[in-house]
Image (spheres, coloured by chain):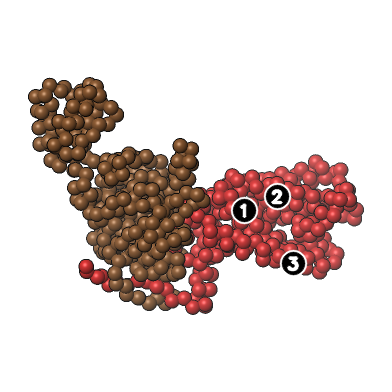
Chain colours: A red, B brown
Amino acid sequence: MTTTTFPATVPVTTERSSLVKAASDTMAITWRNLLMLRRVPQLLVFSTIQPVLFVLMFRYVFGGAIRVPGVRYVDYLMPGIFAQTVAFGSINTGVGLAQDLGTGLIERFRSLPMARSAVLAGRTAADVVRNVLVVALMVSVGFIVGFRVHTNAAGLLAAVGLMLLFGFALSWVFALIGLATANPESAQAAAFPLLAPLVFASSAFVPLKSMPGWLQVFAAHQPVTITVDAVRALVLGGPTLRPVVQMVAWAVGLIAVFAPLAVSRYRRAA
Amino acid sequence: MTTNHAPHDGPAIEVESLTKRFGSVVALDGIDLSVPAGTVFGLLGPNGAGKTTTVRILTTILQPDGGHARVLGLDVGREPHAVRASLGLAGQYAAVDEHLTARENLKLAGWLTGQPRASARARGEELLERFDLTAAAGRVAGTYSGGMRKRLDLAVALVHRPPVLFLDEPTTGLDPQGRGDLWELIEELVAEGMTLLLTTQYLEEADRLADRIAVVDNGRVVAEGTAPELKARLGSTIIDVGLADPAAAARARVLLEPFGPAEIVDGTAVEVNVDDGARALLQIVRLLDRERLEPETVAIREPTLDDVFLTLTGRRAEASGGAAPDTNDRGRARRRGAQRGAA
């Protein structure tokens, strides 16, 4: 038998070069996901229609009936709307991954010499960029309907930063759900019952005091309330350190739990 | 990124006693393969035979339960990253991003395989040209025909010049024109010295492209050889004689036995595997006429995968011809398992 000798390309990976490669792969996937956002702008448009409707509904329909002591309702409402928008927007991460699984794209990625974490990191990073657009739009909508920042621009920017961090943390939760369901419709369906109680049984739209006592216990200690309270403190005034630290702790905790779970799920996904 | 070039002697692809189960269903039941470098190897079998599972293990997408698989001497389980750097995969579904243009799909693949930007761009243009996609390169892939998508999928798999290429049912779902185009492209790649493992349900495809063919059934290799070797076991042409009733068919079968393996199909038809189709056809018609057995139909045809299976396994392949392209090995294996369980 004839033996043929030919070169096999074997990458020599050191820790540094593999980190650089992981960052480069993540950028590649982020680039691809952002291109998709540009190609299918409907994705962005439709996901902002619902929160805009909520703004109009709560500002002009229910708002008159809701009394929050010491603050105009529109100023109280908008931080809640921001959190709601970002929370529901994070479903996108799961839906997008489920789609990529379905089309066989992830299978191809898994056969490429690329970092295992990049598909997920690139997806969640692109969703952060997406959230920048969505939050900017919702802040503008807020200004149009009469929302005013009581602190200053730095407070608003810090609040936007918190919203992005919150969205990023939730993206990892939905990354796991998207990979586990492996079907865009199921990922979407699984998300709503998970998010609805968090978003609505929170301080987003009404003060906790208006809820029954047992519900207040849940509402006061869940991440949406904590995020909304931190954002309110930053844009409306009041002590900020405690709510911000609590919120960041929640976000870091969610990422620390769900990012490794999602990556491990991705490794096994087939 | 630095790369070194580790020379490798011996087979480009080696598979030893590979096993894989999905739950209670055995997808691979001890597969052995050896593919010399620079040759084309065809895995031929019906849906659910284990072809795709084998490819998925060799391309590091799946872990085997047992056995060994090596690509260029590298163990796919122990050194998956190095294996990935040397292989290209084009799967059944043409996994291109349909929201990206052809050029962007190629850029993404170049980026992810760690190619320097400039050379990746040049390589991308070269592949677009070669695969006749230049004119459509700026359009999103979602607007492409099935044949164009498959060509783009293949181009994407070649961006990093892998020495080993895996093609999983490359022409499933294509029309004859698209199939012919793709065959020509594949033949060009092979002429350049690439090692190729392809799976197919079409005997004609394996015959045209592969140096050696392994026939796979139920997770096992049931026959292996060159196309002429397999055909020699099969007879190169099939003559199909339809008769009036089972008694006539039984008589005809005995009469036609000397021409080659003959058997009764569907009660009233006789199929004979012959070597020289035209001559045998003439002789068979004359013989039947002499014996006053008037056939209702006489047909001559090339052997199909079904015939290979009938000969090799004594039963018909469950699926033949154009199977749905949206199924996968694992799902099929599950369904087959379920059917078997219910039977």
Q: Residue at x 58, y 50 (%)?
A: A181
Tell me which chain the residue with mark 1 is part of: A
- Residue at the spot x=90%, y=53% of the render? A69
Residue A143 seen: no
Q: Choose mark 3 or mark 1, whichever is in front.
A: 1
Which amino acid lies under the numbered mark 2 shown in the image of this protein?
Leu
For mark 2, what is the residue? A194
Do the residues at discs 2 and 3 belong to one chain?
yes
Precedes in sequence: disc 3 or disc 1: 1
CB within 8 Å, label 2 to label 1: yes
Q: Which amino acid does label 3 sit on?
A: Ala
- Is disc 3 in the same subunit as disc 1? yes
Q: Quadrant of residue B19?
A: bottom left
Q: Residue tagged by mark 3?
A: A249
Q: Nearer the viewer, residue B326 or A118?
A: B326
- Report x, y in % for residue B181: 28, 49
| Three-letter code for the amino acid on which mark 1 is drawn | Ile
- The relative height of residue B234 versus residue A179 in the rendered view (above or below) is above
Considering the image in quadrants, where does the N terminus of chain A appear? bottom left
Instruction: Give A230 or B45, whichever is nearer the viewer.
Output: B45
The CA distance from mark 2 to mark 1 is 11 Å
Q: Is mark 3 on a helix, strand or loop?
A: helix
Mark 2, residues whose alpha carbon is within 10 Å: few (<14), some, or many (≥20)? few
Q: What element carries label 1?
A: helix
Separation (CA) of disc 3 from disc 1: 22 Å
Q: Tell me, for residue A177, which label it has, or none.
A: 1
Residue B7 vertical placement versus B37 (above, below):
below
Q: Which residue is found at the position 46% from the left and 59% from the top?
A: B65
Question: Which is more toward the observer, B299 or A63?
Answer: B299
